[in-house]
Image: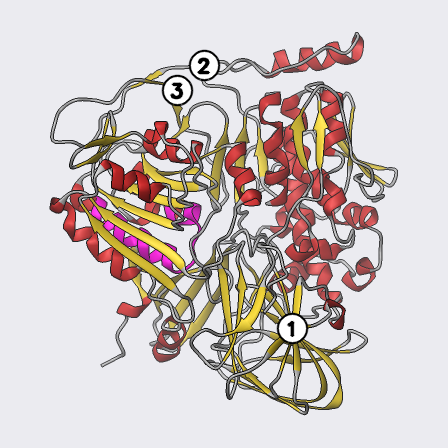
């Protein structure tokens, strides 16, 4: 089935081991199952049978379907009007007609097209569909987005501004509903060249919004996500400001607010991005998804805005209305931002901006350690630009310092000196923090443009199984071998788990060059490389690394991890100093459980930094947003429980957005009678429940649970005696 599709298109086919369908998204390593009463025949059909766009579609010979667990469901008529929203415990019966059923699973976006009657029964464990027809059409759309084109720019700031003005061309709408991730396409790529070149048809939409900044890279880079999200034009000006339909808003940093730390230009840009995004999410509840959104309730308590009227207004007018709201009024409703990115303001790093804009990152431009300029020096340069002829502007060269690393080894030798700056970036108030530039950013992930681009060039295999390799090259660390039993303990997802001990250099080389989704390495790293029984394997000298992601749970493994990323891996977790074996074993087990539950590498490291004794010794190298498996609820969750005086518990749920469920995704806890939705970042909700209700919810997945500041797992919770 679907054999004529390219390797990146989702497949709909009979399930290999059950009665039903398997929907596979090879580029995302995602799988979803639809069960049927018996075996089924599947044939291709046109994709125009669905109200919303799909990548692939199939006709399935069945009158009934069942999901393996509950999925939020919307049923629309042929005109696109919502006729039913299905929640746990609901039974819905609809008369014969043409219906489109939306199933936003965590793996792929699924749609059913039916002509006939529809009956739905929803429970915590499943959705059961009965159709008054003998066939149903199934459509699938990948959450993965590809950029439509590549824009080339010179190193001239004016050309860079014009290049960044094209980012908004990827928006699928300029209404407030662009706050939905699936209505924001991936921005065009930007690369350096000898002249500015913008492909035909790639231009900013006409939103009436302009961002003016001085033609300095430290002013241009931070507004890239704003230019993308607003579909704005970026142009030079003596003072940073937002111009919307003849109205101006200064980006002068005079407006400090609780959800953006500090002041100054970058803080002002972050505030505009965050505030506009939040209020777009509220306003969009007047549109396709008229749900009970928690953030809307919080905003309406303190803000007097007519959201029904705002929904019909152009984006420039919406932004103008949004920015009249005092920032202090939005503190309680503002979701925790996913990503803060520190980017060196050098033309070399301009290619990372479309990827950061795609994630709506807050972008900052710090100076290199020891090479900063004062605010007066920057101000003098700005005045010089607009007083005299334009000049070529570049950030200062990066300072370099010797970093001596000490590998975990039976010997006392230290690794070779690496000429890189080791520093700690300024704190950020986001869930994740990354750094783009020279140096080793302790406390943040280290990102490169090549790692970003591997999101787009990843070549999926035809094997839908997720391959995980666990390697232990020191028998004294065998306590960590239990991770091979943790990976793959997920229903409805196929895994191929291998476990090896004492791999030789050639065996390790072969493994690293094979198609492995995740490598969990337990052992030693010395100055020469990864230690094997017969010598060392230096990843810096490898060609064609096939491993997608990894954990090198060894002392001071940063250099070897960076070598894997430089030579083909997407991302990995490595250490920046020596680690004690017992504590490292605990970290290894926690990492395995978090990754197995769908957390990204960056989110995994953030959690272990908070709750593991040596968690701060670990960092992500490469694409920190990479993940190994999907989460059944879409957005991975961390729970925090606190007993109350009346025998009940307060359950707080924290969301960790992923590339396939970014900022703007709605989260709905599947509890009987709970109808409220939440945005999926940071603390999403705090709910009072009885003990059995609380445990019933948490036991649906093996989620991390914080109790009395200790990290536990929901499957360790026991029923009340």
Q: Is residue 599 magenta?
A: yes
- Work out whether mark 2 precedes mark 1 in sequence or the reverse, and give the earlier one: 1
Between the residue at mark 1 and the residue at mark 3, the CA separation in whole angstroms equals: 53 Å
Which residue has dot 3 on it? 420
The residue under the point 56% across, 83% down is: 65
The residue under the point 34% across, 63% down is: 488
Which residue has dot 1 on it? 58
Q: Is residue 272 magenta?
A: no
Relative to 4, residue 479 above or below: above
Tell which tag, 1 or 3, sits nearer the viewer.
1
Counting other residues with Cα less than 10 Å from the Cα at mark 1, is it few (<14), some (14-19), or many (20 or more)? many
Which residue has dot 2 on it? 399
In the image, taking residue 417 as reference, residue 103 lies left or right, namely right
Looking at the image, do the residues carrying marks 3 and 2 touch, with CB atoms under 8 Å apart?
A: no
The picture quadrant where one finds residue 361 is top right
Residue 600 shows up from this direction: yes
- SS for dot 2: loop
Read off the magenta span: 584-605
Counting other residues with Cα less than 10 Å from the Cα at mark 3, is it few (<14), some (14-19), or many (20 or more)? some
- Work out whether mark 1 precedes mark 3 in sequence or the reverse, and give the earlier one: 1
Instruction: Say which of 337 and 149 sits in front.
Output: 149
The residue under the point 71% across, 65% down is: 285
Instruction: Say which of 337 and 572 sits in front.
Output: 572
> Which scheme is used to colour this image of the protein?
secondary structure
- Work out whether mark 3 precedes mark 2 in sequence or the reverse, and give the earlier one: 2
Q: What type of secondary structure mainly makes up the magenta span?
A: helix
- SS for dot 3: loop
Residue 328 in the image: state x and y as whole percent: 62, 47
Relative to 462, residue 94 above or below: below
The picture quadrant where one finds residue 537 is top left
Counting other residues with Cα less than 10 Å from the Cα at mark 2, is it few (<14), some (14-19), or many (20 or more)? some
Residue 562 in the image: state x and y as whole percent: 39, 32
């Amino acid at each position: 089935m679907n054999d004529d599709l390219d390797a990146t298109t989702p497949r709909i086919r009979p399930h290999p081991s059950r009665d039903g369908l398997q929907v596979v998204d090879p580029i995302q390593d995602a799988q979803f199952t639809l069960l049927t009463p018996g075996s089924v025949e599947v044939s291709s059909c046109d994709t125009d049978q669905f109200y919303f766009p799909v990548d692939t579609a199939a006709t399935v010979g069945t009158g009934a379907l069942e999901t393996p667990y509950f999925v939020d469901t919307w049923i629309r008529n042929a005109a696109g009007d919502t006729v039913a929203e299905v929640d746990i415990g609901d039974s819905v019966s609809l008369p014969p007609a043409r219906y489109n059923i939306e199933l936003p699973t965590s793996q792929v976006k699924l749609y059913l097209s039916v002509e006939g009657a529809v009956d739905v029964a929803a429970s915590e464990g499943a959705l059961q569909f009965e159709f008054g027809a003998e066939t149903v059409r199934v459509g699938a759309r990948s959450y993965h987005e590809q950029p439509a084109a590549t824009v080339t720019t010179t190193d001239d700031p004016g050309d860079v501004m014009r290049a960044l003005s094209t980012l908004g061309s990827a928006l699928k709408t300029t209404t407030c509903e662009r706050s939905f991730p699936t209505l924001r396409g991936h921005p065009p790529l930007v690369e350096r060249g000898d002249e500015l070149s913008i492909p035909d048809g790639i231009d900013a939409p006409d939103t009436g919004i302009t961002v003016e900044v001085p033609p300095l890279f430290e002013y241009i880079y931070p507004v890239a996500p704003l230019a993308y999200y607003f579909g704005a034009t970026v142009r030079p000006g003596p003072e940073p400001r937002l111009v919307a339909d003849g109205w101006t808003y200064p980006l002068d940093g005079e407006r400090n607010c609780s959800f953006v730390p500090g002041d100054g230009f970058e803080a002002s840009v972050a505030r505009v991005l965050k505030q506009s995004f939040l209020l777009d999410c509220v306003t969009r509840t007047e549109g396709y998804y008229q749900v009970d959104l928690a953030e809307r309730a919080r905003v309406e308590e303190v803000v007097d805005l007519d959201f029904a009227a705002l929904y019909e207004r152009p984006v420039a007018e919406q932004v103008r209305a949004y920015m009249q709201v005092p920032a202090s009024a939005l503190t309680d409703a503002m979701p925790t931002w996913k990503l803060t990115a520190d980017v060196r303001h050098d033309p070399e790093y301009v290619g990372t901006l479309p990827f950061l804009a795609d994630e709506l990152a807050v972008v900052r431009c710090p100076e290199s350690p020891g090479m900063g300029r004062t605010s007066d020096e920057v101000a003098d340069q700005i005045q010089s630009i607009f007083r005299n002829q334009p000049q070529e502007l570049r950030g200062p060269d990066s300072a370099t310092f010797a970093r001596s690393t000490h590998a975990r080894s039976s010997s006392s030798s230290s690794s070779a000196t690496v000429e890189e700056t080791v520093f700690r970036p300024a704190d950020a108030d986001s869930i994740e923090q990354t750094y783009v530039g020279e140096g080793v950013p302790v406390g943040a992930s280290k990102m490169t443009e090549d790692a970003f681009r591997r999101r787009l060039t990843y070549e999926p295999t035809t094997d839908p199984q997720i391959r995980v390799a666990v390697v232990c090259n020191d028998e004294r660390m065998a306590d960590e071998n239990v991770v091979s039993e943790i990976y793959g303990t997920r229903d409805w997802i196929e895994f191929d788990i291998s476990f090896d001990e004492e791999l030789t250099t050639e065996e390790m080389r072969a493994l690293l060059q094979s198609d492995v989704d995740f490598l969990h390495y337990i052992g030693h790293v010395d100055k020469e490389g990864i230690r094997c029984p017969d010598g060392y394997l230096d990843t810096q000298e490898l060609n064609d690394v096939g491993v997608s992601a990894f954990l090198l749970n060894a002392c001071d493994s940063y250099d070897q991890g960076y070598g894997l990323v430089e030579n083909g891996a997407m991302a990995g977790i490595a250490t920046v100093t020596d680690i004690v074996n017992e504590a490292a074993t605990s970290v290894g087990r926690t990492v395995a459980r978090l990754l197995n539950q769908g957390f990204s590498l960056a989110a995994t490291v953030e959690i272990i930094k908070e709750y593991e004794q040596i968690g701060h010794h670990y960092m992500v190298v490469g694409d920190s947003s990479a993940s190994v498996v999907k989460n059944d609820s879409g957005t991975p969750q961390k729970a925090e429980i606190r007993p109350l005086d009346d025998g009940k518990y307060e359950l707080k749920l924290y969301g960790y957005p992923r590339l396939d469920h970014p900022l703007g995704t709605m989260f709905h806890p599947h509890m009987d009678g709970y109808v409220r939705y939440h945005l999926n970042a940071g603390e999403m909700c705090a709910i009072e429940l009885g003990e059995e209700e609380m445990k019933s919810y948490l036991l649906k997945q093996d989620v991390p649970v914080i109790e009395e500041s200790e990290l536990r797992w929901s499957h360790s919770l026991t029923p009340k005696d």
